[in-house]
Image (cartoon, rainbow, N blue to C red):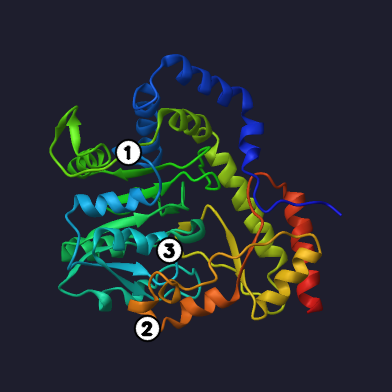
């Protein structure tokens, strides 16, 4: 039986070993291990790649959401609209500022935030809307950006899973007023450790986030803000610069694999396949389908040699971190997704033949349940 991997973060190193080793040597030989040319270069490259003016490298993806909220002065007494269904970091980012996350239920097709329910959630305490391009599938941003501009709200994209995703001709990072990215190793563009970035066209916001990430300082020993330490180190930046050159090809492989799954599993009974909003292009960070008997299917697929995963089986409002405040609320679509979701392997480490074979096994196993 062919041994498939759900995720292979070592694939990128094996594929680009010579270039990555050379990048390592350049940074180590430079003696510049905080800031410097490698970081400056990556920030410029990634901003341009996203179609934005500025990029600020940060310590991780969570900080890439926390710091722009803080930079806008969002805190206790304020509200930020978030998806009910997302990785918990989206909610944690709001909570860390002292503001209150206001959940909106998911769209059953895309599993992203239900755009039709956002306006009703806005109150006089709302300061920002934070949509998530979940699983690599971007939200439709034009109307949402117009709504935020009309209401004086910040539109902050959680683009942690969406490097290269497009709404029309705009990439994630150029849809809202700012976007937070994660470079966690398993992401479409992943470092070899933690990392993140803010991307924006707003020079003032970029400057303030950079200060907040560097002890509140622009100039050494002059601390104008009560900042912290959240910096992308130049070694990871150098690695990301190498990998960025291959990201479009890797995303294309993910899209081709997703197309195989969507085609081969279209008539498989009881499977609900992921959808993408019209006019958008997903980069398929994850391929998440749904089945009413998820646990039985999961076990059967593992026994058949297909590694699968769960993203995310516990609804945020029912998690220990938020249950006391939000546990009494009901988000039927989000809860249904959590109860039925199952992720198939996807990534550039797989061939299209692998995808065909996996889809065949999924179809056969599902029909046997």
Against 164, residue 330 (above or below) is below
Residue at image point 61% right, 43% down: 9
Determine contact: label 2, label 3, CB under 8 Å. Answer: no
Label 1 sits on a secondary structure element that is strand
Determine contact: label 2, label 1, CB under 8 Å. Answer: no
Query: Tag 2: Cα neighbours inside 10 Å, few (<14), some, or many (≥20)?
Result: few
Query: Tag 1: Cα neighbours inside 10 Å, few (<14), some, or many (≥20)?
Result: many
Calculate the distance from the C-alpha at mark 2 to the C-alpha at mark 3. 16 Å
| Residue mark closest to the camera, 2 vs 1 | 2
User: Which one is earlier in the sequence, the residue at label 2 or at label 3?
Assistant: 3
Which residue is labeled 1 in the image?
55
- Residue reaching furthest right? 1
Against 104, residue 288 (above or below) is above
Label 3 sits on a secondary structure element that is loop
User: Which one is earlier in the sequence, the residue at label 3 or at label 1?
Assistant: 1
Q: Is residue 170 left or right of residue 10?
A: left
Calculate the distance from the C-alpha at mark 3 to the C-alpha at mark 1. 24 Å
Q: Position of residue 305 (x, y in %)?
A: 79, 60
| Residue 72 in sight from this viewpoint | yes
Against 3, residue 15 (above or below) is above
User: Which one is earlier in the sequence, the residue at label 2 or at label 1?
Assistant: 1
| Residue mark closest to the camera, 3 vs 1 | 3
Calculate the distance from the C-alpha at mark 2 to the C-alpha at mark 1. 37 Å
Q: Position of residue 151 (x, y in %)?
A: 17, 66
Number of marks drawn: 3
Label 2 sits on a secondary structure element that is loop
Q: Is residue 2 left or right of residue 314?
A: right
Quarter occupied by residue 267: bottom right
Determine contact: label 3, label 1, CB under 8 Å. Answer: no
Which residue is labeled 2 in the image?
329
Residue at image point 77% right, 50% down: 353
């Amino acid at each position: 039986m062919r041994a498939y991997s759900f995720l292979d973060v070592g694939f990128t190193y094996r594929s680009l070993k010579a270039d990555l080793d050379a990048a390592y040597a350049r940074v180590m030989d430079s003696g510049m291990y905080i800031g410097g040319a490698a970081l400056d270069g990556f920030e410029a490259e990634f901003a341009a790649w996203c179609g934005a003016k500025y990029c600020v490298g940060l310590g991780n993806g969570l900080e890439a959401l926390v710091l722009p909220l803080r930079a806008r002065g969002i805190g206790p007494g304020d509200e930020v609209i978030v998806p009910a269904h997302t990785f918990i970091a989206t909610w944690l980012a709001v909570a860390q500022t002292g503001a209150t996350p206001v959940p909106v239920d998911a769209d059953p097709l895309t599993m992203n935030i239900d755009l039709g329910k956002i306006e009703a959630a806005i109150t006089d305490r709302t300061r920002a809307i934070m949509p998530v391009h979940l699983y690599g599938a971007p939200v439709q941003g034009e109307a949402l950006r117009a709504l935020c501009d009309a209401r004086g709200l910040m539109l902050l994209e959680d683009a942690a899973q969406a490097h290269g995703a497009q709404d029309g001709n705009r990439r994630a990072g150029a849809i809202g007023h700012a976007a937070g990215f994660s470079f966690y190793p398993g992401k479409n563009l992943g470092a070899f450790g933690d990392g993140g970035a803010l991307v924006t066209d707003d020079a003032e916001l970029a400057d303030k986030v950079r200060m907040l990430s560097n002890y509140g300082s622009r100039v050494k020993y002059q601390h104008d803000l009560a900042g912290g330490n959240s910096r992308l180190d130049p070694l990871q930046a150098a690695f990301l610069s190498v990998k960025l050159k291959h990201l479009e090809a890797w995303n294309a492989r993910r899209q081709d694999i997703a197309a195989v799954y969507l085609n081969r599993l279209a008539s498989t009974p009881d499977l609900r396949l992921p959808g993408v909003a019209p006019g958008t292009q997903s980069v398929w960070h994850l391929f998440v389908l749904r089945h009413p008997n998820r646990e039985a299917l999961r076990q059967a697929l593992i026994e058949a040699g297909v590694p699968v995963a769960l993203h995310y089986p516990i609804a945020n409002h029912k998690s220990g971190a938020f249950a006391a405040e939000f546990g009494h609320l009901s988000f039927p679509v989000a809860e249904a997704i959590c109860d039925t979701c199952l992720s198939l392997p996807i990534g550039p480490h797989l061939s299209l033949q692998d995808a065909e074979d996996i889809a065949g096994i999924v179809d056969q196993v599902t029909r046997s349940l």
